[in-house]
DNA sequence: CTAAGTTATGCAAAGGTTTGCATAACGGTC
DNA sequence: GACCGTTATGCAAACCTTTGCATAACTTAG
């Protein structure tokens, strides 16, 4: 249906090259007469000409397209990231192709493969899993790539993410300040960059307050709602349940809320809850959920800026950007008077409960 | 970096055709010796061969790609739709390119243009705005297309959406049953298919209950949060404010919640709220939000099935599918005893307030 | 009148893949 | 020895665009 340069050339009696030049608005540059220019343009319109991006990409060896891969586009955090990336890329004149890896490393790998076949000009990836062979391959093939949110400690690639350690510190320190010492952490996918750093922050905060780390209180295995639901249930059934839960992601928090509701646990009265990620609806939840906010717009802006720079200056040094998280205090955490319990000696040095030090 | 068929041909000493056939696993079909097959395969591996999708698409005149356009990917409803579409398309062996039109008809049009240039094999579009010239062009060019959620009454194109009229009836009838008669409707973008039908359902429900339609109570102009916020504020400041609000979309409802909070309006005590769309977090809001649920998975399944059928059987008759909505009653609507007010005669036939009929 | 410059345009290759048609070499049949 | 059927492979066109190089027809300068 769609016509080609050749069709226009035939109709107007000029060569394909001339048509191409006219349609690129290069008439002056190639000194094509105004008359010819007009004839060609009108023929193009009549025939409903539309450039073939495949042929153009093939010839030019570039596509002006960026491949984006995220673990879960229905997760509010990622849908916001994608939205913001989309806006930024549009400004720079790039199109993009989004893949949802569904938190599955294999889908991610096949997404990378497919995007490489499509010859995208660059990648923006929030990687799932712990293996980065496929990412390394992209980098080593000199194809521009920026990792967002989820990157790898052991892989030198441009990246931008929130300071996860600091975010956890913010959340857990706040809980501690409110008197909590039995604080559970429901984590996301173990081994991932985001998760490990959030866990790290959690542990550091406890250690700094001389609170014993109880491995029983560190649970969970992915970033989904059901994980939050299940692990909250089991935390609640502990003989010595936590007084506060810190979740590694917004969906996990939603699952926690569901579990509490089912068990008739009132937040914050019976249990305090705080989460990493601050979805738009956090303040309208029951109760309004305290959360660690990530600067999603800034993450997207930085990611696109870095990618753009990498495309233009392939040789530049690689950078890792950490952005500041922000704690939004709402009403899901209650101040409690800590229980003074003498139980649970550890190695003779530390005791659970923040108020008793050095026994 | 990436090698081509020619590279492999040179390395192995066979022709490009043979290489192509081997890599398509067509060795038997073309009786290529096992030895040659092995040599070619190993060379392909050594050279890190990766097919060039541009060249292939150009040659084959198809791309196995579907273009998706939605108005707002950060809207939970659409992010779920996209997620589900992604899963369905993957099953059928299709890749896809997502565009976010940002509720802007111009961006949508340029998205369509760009996807046409990329030679996608089909479109799935949730269209914004009221103009469908660009959609018609796709259809008339015989490129398979399915509209989802937002389609056009006057345009004959395959489409699948929820029964919007019925959804509104469900919501408003429920409000009426609970004793409400001053029911406001905060609409989305006027003129869009989804909005007009939701509005229609709202009006029908009121008429059936002999409740006067008060145009003052029909407000709003797009599907975003801010619209909900603003219009709720102004509804609340009315001399005769509504006792219940029905919002046309989940983001609008979020805005309404925000406005109520600011004005210290307690839902459902001071005001009842119900919305179209049922996002995952609805039951955890404060209060748990009653909502009309759309079958997002089914919408995605149907859309992909219809698109697939259109690709395989271009001549089939076009179909419009309406799926059943479901009312999820939670706790944002309160039963009230209707005020018996004799005021506000209309044309002598109808009076506001559902309990007084025929004066 | 010749050389050089300008104007307006065309030729053909290149980018990588797919595929209809051809063919060479060989074994077998009549 | 003429003919046919396999087996294994190659040739070359086609998909559409871009672009370096060429060139024909003029004009102007010297």
Image (cartoon, coloured by chain):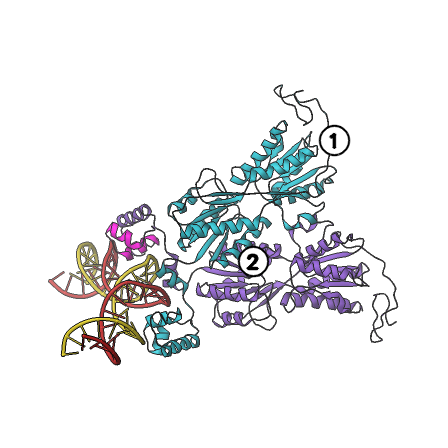
Chain colours: A purple, B cyan, C red, D yellow
**Under tag 1, what secondary structure?**
loop
Tell me: A277 left or right of A267: left
Q: Quadrant of residue A147?
A: bottom right
**Under tag 2, what secondary structure?**
helix
Q: Quadrant of residue A20?
A: bottom left
Q: Nearer the viewer, residue B1 or A24?
A: B1
Name the chief secondary structure element in magenta.
helix
Span highlighted in magenta in the image: A5-25
Q: Is residue B78 visible?
A: no
Residue B315 lies in the magenta stretch: no
Mark in the foreground, 1 or 2: 1
Distance from label 1 to label 2 (Cα)? 53 Å
Mark on residue A105? none
- Residue at numbered disc 1: B337
Q: Dividing the image into 4 quarters, which one contains the C terminus of chain B?
A: top right
**Is B113 placed above or below B238 here?**
below
Q: What residue is shown at x 75% (from left), y 69% (from top)? A: A215
Residue A122 in the image: x percent, y percent? 48, 64
Residue B147 in the image: x percent, y percent? 48, 46
**Is A123 placed above or below B174 here?**
below
Chain of the residue on which disc 2 is drawn: A
Residue A33 in the image: x percent, y percent? 27, 51
Tell me: B68 left or right of A217: left
Mark on residue A301? 2
- Say few, some or many: other residues with alpha carbon within 10 Å of mark 1 (under 14 / 14 to 19 / 20 or more): few
> Do the dots labelled 1 and 2 sit on one chain?
no
Residue B153 in the image: x percent, y percent? 48, 38
Tell me: B318 left or right of B327: left
């Amino acid at each position: 249906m769609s016509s080609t340069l050749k069709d226009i050339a035939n109709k107007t009696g000029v060569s394909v090259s001339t048509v191409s030049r006219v349609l690129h608005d290069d008439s002056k540059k190639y000194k094509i007469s105004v008359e010819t220019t007009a004839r060609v343009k009108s023929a193009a319109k009549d025939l409903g000409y539309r450039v073939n991006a495949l042929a153009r990409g093939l010839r030019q060896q570039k596509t002006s397209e960026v491949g984006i891969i995220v673990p879960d586009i229905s997760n509010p955090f990622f849908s916001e990231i994608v939205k913001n990336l989309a806006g930024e890329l549009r400004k720079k004149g790039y199109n993009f192709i989004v893949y949802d890896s569904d938190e599955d490393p294999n889908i991610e790998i096949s997404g990378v493969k497919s995007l490489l076949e499509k010859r995208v000009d660059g990648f923006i990836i929030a990687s799932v899993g712990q293996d980065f062979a496929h990412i390394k391959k992209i980098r080593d093939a000199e194809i521009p790539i920026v990792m967002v949110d989820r990157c790898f400690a052991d892989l030198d690639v441009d990246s931008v993410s929130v300071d996860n350690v600091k975010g956890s510190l913010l959340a857990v320190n706040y809980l501690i300040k409110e008197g909590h010492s039995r604080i559970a952490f429901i984590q996301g996918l173990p081994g991932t960059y985001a998760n490990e750093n959030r866990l790290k922050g959690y542990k550091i905060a406890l250690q700094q307050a001389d609170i014993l780390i109880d491995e029983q209180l560190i649970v969970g295995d992915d970033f989904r709602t059901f994980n939050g639901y299940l692990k909250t249930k089991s935390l609640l059934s502990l003989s010595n349940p936590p007084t506060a839960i810190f979740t590694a992601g917004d969906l996990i928090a939603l699952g926690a809320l569901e579990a509490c509701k089912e068990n008739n646990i009132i937040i914050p009265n019976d249990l305090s809850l705080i989460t990493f990620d601050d979805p738009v609806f956090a303040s309208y939840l029951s109760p309004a959920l305290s959360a660690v906010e990530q600067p999603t717009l800034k993450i997207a802006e930085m990611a696109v800026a870095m990618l753009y720079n990498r495309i233009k200056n392939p040789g530049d040094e690689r950078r890792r950007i950490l952005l500041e998280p922000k704690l939004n205090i709402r009403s899901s955490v209650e101040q409690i008077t800590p229980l003074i319990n003498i139980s649970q000696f550890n190695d003779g040095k530390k005791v659970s409960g923040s108020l008793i030090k050095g026994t």
